[in-house]
Structure formats: C-alpha cells, structure tokens
Image (cartoon, grey):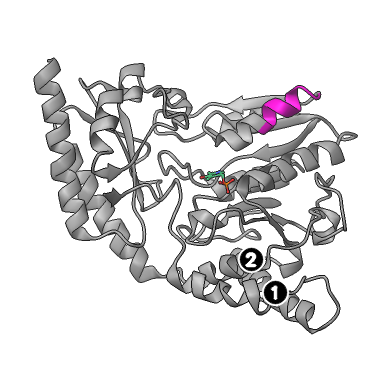
Amino acid sequence: MIYLDYNATTPVDINVLQEMLPYFSQSFGNAASAYSYGLDAKKAVDISREKIARHLHCNAQEIIFTSGATESINLALKGVFESYREKGNHIITVATEHKAVLDTCKNLESKGAEITLLSVDKNGIIDLEELKNSIKKTTILIAIMYANNETGVIQAIEKIGKISKENNVLFFCDATQAIGKAPMNVIEDNIDLLCLSGHKIYAPKGIGALYVRRKNPRVSLTEQINGGGHERGWRSGTLNVPSIVGLGKAFDLFNEEEIEKIKLLRNKLEEGLLQISGTFLNGDKEKRIFNTVNISFSDVHGKMLIADLTKQIAVSSGSACSSASVEPSHVLEAMGVPEELNRSSIRFSLGRLITEQEIDFTIDYVKSCVEKIRSIYL
Ligand SMILES: *Cc1c(COP(=O)(O)O)cnc(C)c1O
C-alpha cells in the first residue's frame, strides 16, 4: 500500500517520537506545578513555544496550545465573535474553506452572526476586489486559509492581510496545510490569528496551536473552555506536554532539500497522470503548495475509481469524510467543476516518506485502473 494522503494525516516522525518519549513516564510533571517535575515540563513546553514562534515570526507568548486545528478554529472564530459583538457581527470567509471553518461559521450564524462566503474563480483563487467590496462597518473578521487541503491552492495572503489591516478588520488564517510548506510571517502578512495542527506536520494527532496577536492590534478573545486559566486564560486544561514537545520538534525537521525532492516527485506524478486521456488538473498550477495534485478523470464512475485505487494506494476523493458515499467536493463545486468530474476527482498528497519507485508505480497503477473501468463501461 502506497501512502499518498499526507494532507489527511502524516505519520509521527521517528525523531519527533523520540523527543516525546521521556515526557510520558520520566519527566511526567504537570507544567503548572512549582517543583522540579513541573519546572522540567514547563521548560520543555516553553522550548516548543519558542520554536513555533520563531517559525511564525511572532512572540512565544502569542502561541496557545490546543487539541488541533479544529479547536483552534473554534476558539478563534467563536472567541472573536463573542468578544467583538459591540463592533459588529459580520464575518467574511470563502466557499472553499475547510469544514471546520464553514461549520463554525454556520454555528455562529445561528447565534446572530452575518456570514459572507466569497466565491473563487475556476482556479480556486478569490477576487481581492470582491473581498474589499464585502467589508462593511460591522465586519469584525476575515477568515481565509493559506493553502487549500484538497487542491493545494494558495491565496494571496499578504494582500489579504494588507486589506484587513487597512480596514481595521481582524484576519484569521487557517495555515494547517501551509506550515512547513510555505514561508510563514505573521508580521509581514498582517495575520492576527493563525491555526496549525500537529498531525499534518509529522507530530501526533490531538495537538495544535493558535497564534493570537498581542499588539498592533491586541486581539481579544472570549475563551471557549473554562478551568484553571491555562494559556492566558483562553484554553484551560492541563497541558499535553509530550505532544507539545513533539509539535515543537516537528518544526526542527522542515528542510529545503526535502521540499525540492517532494516537489520533483509531485511534478513527475502530475505529468504522468495528465498523460492519461480525459484528465483535468484542479486548482491553479502555479499558486499551489508543492506536495498536492488534484485530478479529475472523465468517463469513470467516481465510486468505482476510488474503490479500485485504494486497493493499492491511499488517496482521497473529494473531501468525502463518509466512506459510505462519495459526496461531491464543496471545494471543486465552488470552482465550477462539473458534477461528474467532481465525483471522479482524486487528491494525491505527497510527503516525507514517498519514493520515486512508488510514484512510478502509482502512475502505472492509476492508468491501468482508469483504462479498465473505461473498457468495461464505455
Ligand atoms: C486537517 C485540517 C484541519 C483540521 O485539523 P485537525 O487538527 O485535524 O482538527 C483544518 N484545516 C485544514 C486546512 C486542514 O487541512
């Protein structure tokens, strides 16, 4: 079985695991305790916080540890909505965001929020004029992801940040798919809140972080979990020290060489697959993270294709979370991909452990699956 679904989750890197191990049974202290066990744990947490902050170009105090990107998104959106009610109730986001953002917005809508969903063009890119025109007096937040999990498409983050700042509106960026894949600078990009997740970057599942700007402007949030007042009072609960250590370690392991290797293999895979007749690339070819390729296959039944492919390769179709049915992807739908091609779209996402032989096999295997299905049903 060849793993080509790194955008869904990644294996914990062996170096990450090794860094974590002592914090389960030896240095097991509560980071809030004032004696050596606790101080050791706190020191390890602080080192992780520093590593993440350095990567984002922010201050360590601006990092809040959470259970993952979904929780960070809930804290950011609900926290801002509740905290800025006096200013307004209007939130701007995009039709192609992750469900964690869209469903949280839906929840806020039922509590009185007004949500504007920006459209995207056929390449998955938003129109900055549409963004500008949708801002009003009551707008409190712009929530736009850095890189899309299904297509890899990257938005013009720096320009969006600039528009947000000029209009005195907070900018939340879901950077879950961009961390370790694109340069991050919350200062240059005027990002006020940003989320990330451990299990997308070779750290464990169930750990993540939220960056919350402390000055120019100082962002205020209403906490969503009450308790002992951990994490500046915004996320109570005993810190998950081993996972936090692992998350920090993951940031040591990003490297240019690996990026170049994966990019070459992604390009090889993409070129190989697009040589199959009746194939279409989904998403902007240039403005895209280096590890992702999303392709639609004409004249094949989507459900049959994914069933065949997943006998040998781990890939995702659309955003389908329910295994029972192939739901058309809301991302491709927003890009105007016709329903048939939407249902027969496959996301290939590469990562650290992929090899050239596996890519060669994948190209041949996909080709044979598509040809077989077409020969039976056409
Ligand atoms: C995976 C993912 C999430 C959710 O992250 P979890 O840590 O699994 O909750 C949110 N946004 C994007 C873009 C993702 O890829």
Q: Residue furthest front?
A: 25
Is residue 54 visible from the viewing direction of this image?
yes
Magenta stretch prevailing secondary structure: helix
Asked if the magenta segment contains residue 106, the reply would be yes
* Quadrant where ligand 1 appears: top right
Q: How many marks?
A: 2
Q: Residues within 10 Å of mark 1 (few under 14, many from 20)?
A: some
Image point 71% across, 47% down: which residue?
Answer: 165
- Residue 364 rendering spot, x and y as whole percentages: 13, 43
Q: Which residues are magenta?
A: 104-111
Q: Which is more N-terminal, label 1 or label 2?
A: 1
Q: Which mark is residue 28?
A: 1
Q: Is residue 219 above or below residue 28?
A: above
Q: Mark 2 sits on what residue?
A: 244
Label 2 secondary element:
helix
Asked whether, in this view, residue 314 is left or right of residue 58, the answer is left
Asked whether, in this view, residue 310 is left or right of residue 71, the answer is left
Asked if the magenta segment contains residue 207, the reply would be no
Label 2 beta carbon less than 8 Å to ligand 1: no
Is residue 135 visible from the viewing direction of this image?
no
In front of the other: 16 or 219: 16
Frontmost of labels 2 and 1 is: 1
